[in-house]
Image: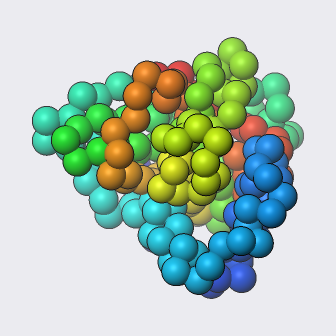
Amino acid sequence: MRYIRHPRLRFGALLLVLALVLAACGGSEDAADTTVMGDEMDMAMNMGDPDATPASEVAGGELVSGSFTLLDTRPSGYDDVTGTAEMARHDGGTTVTIEVSGLEPGTEYISHVHAEPCSNNGGPHYQFEVGGSEVPPNEIHLLFTADEEGNGYMTAENEQTVDGRAVAVVVHPVDLVDNKIACADF
Ligand SMILES: [Cu+2]
């Protein structure tokens, strides 16, 4: 599966994305307001890198994987979404890689590691420090744009190793972030 490289987001767009994500996922309303510029740069770098070593190729990684299944909350037009999520726990932390097809070409999506199974629509986001920051690196987010064939691909790295509460990955459209499209259980 091929992918297109995501263009660098400008900060304004990034803040909009974060605001939408926070609003949709139960984030506190003032979280984005308290962000300072340095954190914005860190968050941009932590939203994923398509050129990072994928989870399945991390040396010494303990790999778990799952297939995406459709959620009833998906918007219309997403009945053919399929794909896989892989997550490696390793000495350097955690690596998560997703491959998704059946998306809308040229459209932005965001995925998060979630803390409840797909039978509960993934529940809340997985957080290293529960109740802490709602953006990376305290959570694992993957921001990507589907290519001209509707395929998406992204890898996110985190320096901490997730515990057993990291059980699922959910894909959301960035512009309809409440409408969870698909979920993969690990
Ligand atoms: Cu999510």
Give the image location of residue 67, x and y in percent: 50, 25
Q: Residue at x 61, y 48 (%)?
A: 132
Q: Residue at x 29, y 29 (%)?
A: 63
Q: How is the image coloured?
A: rainbow
Q: Is residue 133 left or right of residue 54?
A: right
Give the image location of residue 40, x and y in percent: 57, 75
Give the image location of residue 176, x and y in percent: 83, 52
Tell me if residue 97 comes above or below residue 49 in the rendering.
above
Tell me if residue 179 comes above or below residue 30 in the rendering.
above
Q: Residue furthest left?
A: 60
The answer to whether any part of residue 144 appears in the image is: yes
Count the marks: how many? Answer: 0
Q: Quadrant of residue 52?
A: bottom left
Give the image location of residue 151, x and y in percent: 54, 51
Q: Is residue 53 left or right of residue 124?
A: left
Q: Quadrant of residue 86?
A: top left
Q: Residue at x 49, y 29 (%)?
A: 166
The answer to whether any part of residue 95 appears in the image is: no
Q: Quadrant of residue 117?
A: top right
Q: Nearer the viewer, residue 8 or 83?
A: 8
Q: Residue at x 59, y 38 (%)?
A: 130
Q: Residue furthest top?
A: 119
